Image: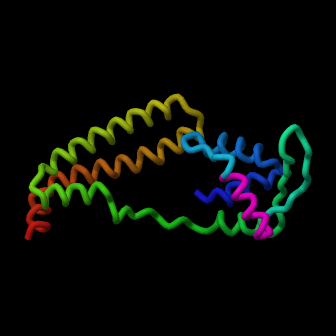
């Protein structure tokens, strides 16, 4: 996720302080990975430097001055460009799990144990996500569906690999 573009998009509804941006980000996108304040302020500093935001006001308070940021026309254009640019699909061609299976075969360990253990871990994660989805709002349901679909694909790969272990052993130990 592009934190900068997300913060810019949040600013389109009106100027905000860094604290308000962090709170909005965490509420909408950061359930599992909230932003650190340092990330917000370093990102805002970078966006300011590139002319994508401007300081809309500075307020003095009991602590440090609070800057209120507003998106610029260049920032709006940048968000629009980012939104319509497709994301590169993740192809998972450098899978740690695949590496573990091949190394187990090369070292004459039981690769099926690795696959079984991983299958159990995937199923455990799927149960947790399914419970979260059942209890969550629509946004949570959609993000859980995304994760569940990926885990289902992984499970299919685990089953396929388990069925082909003998052939894979032959191919990697020649």
On the image, the x and y values in percent for residue 154 come to 32, 51
Q: In which quarter of the image is the N terminus?
A: bottom right
Identify the residue at horizontal 68%, vertical 47% (top origin).
37
* Magenta residues (range): 39-52
Indicate whether 102 appears above or below 141: below
Instruction: Out of 132 and 49, give the one closest to the viewer.
Output: 49
Question: How many marks can you see?
Answer: 0
Tell me which secondary structure the magenta stretch mostly adopts: helix
Identify the residue at horizontal 78%, vertical 54% (top origin).
11
On the image, the x and y values in percent for residue 103 come to 19, 59
Q: Is residue 90 left or right of residue 156?
A: right
Identify the residue at horizontal 38%, vertical 38% (top origin).
125
Q: In this view, does 141 lie to the left or right of 150?
A: right
Indicate whether 10 appears above or below 79: above
On the image, the x and y values in percent for residue 112 come to 15, 48
Instruction: Out of 172 and 108, give the one closest to the viewer.
Output: 108
Indicate whether 101 appears above or below 36: below
Can you tell which quarter of the image residue 139 is in? top right
Residue 26 on the magenta span: no
Identify the residue at horizontal 24%, vertical 55% (top origin).
100
Q: In this view, does 39 lie to the left or right of 127?
A: right
The image's colouring method is: rainbow
Q: Quadrant of the C terminus?
A: bottom left
């Amino acid at each position: 996720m592009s934190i900068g573009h997300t913060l810019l998009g949040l600013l389109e509804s009106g100027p905000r302080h860094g604290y308000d941006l962090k709170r909005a980000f965490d509420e909408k996108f950061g359930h599992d990975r909230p932003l650190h304040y340092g990330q917000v302020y370093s990102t805002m500093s970078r966006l300011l430097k590139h002319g994508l935001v401007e300081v809309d006001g500075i307020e003095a308070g009991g602590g440090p001055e609070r800057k209120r940021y507003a998106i610029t026309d260049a920032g709006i254009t940048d968000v629009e460009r980012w939104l319509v640019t497709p994301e590169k699909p993740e192809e998972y061609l450098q899978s740690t799990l695949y590496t573990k299976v091949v190394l187990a075969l090369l070292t004459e360990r039981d690769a099926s144990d690795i696959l079984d253990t991983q299958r159990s871990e995937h199923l455990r994660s799927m149960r947790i996500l399914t419970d979260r989805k059942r209890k969550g709002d629509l946004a949570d349901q959609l993000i859980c569906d995304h994760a569940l679909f990926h885990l289902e694909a992984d499970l299919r790969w685990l089953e396929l690999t388990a069925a082909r272990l003998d052939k894979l052993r032959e191919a990697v130990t020649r």
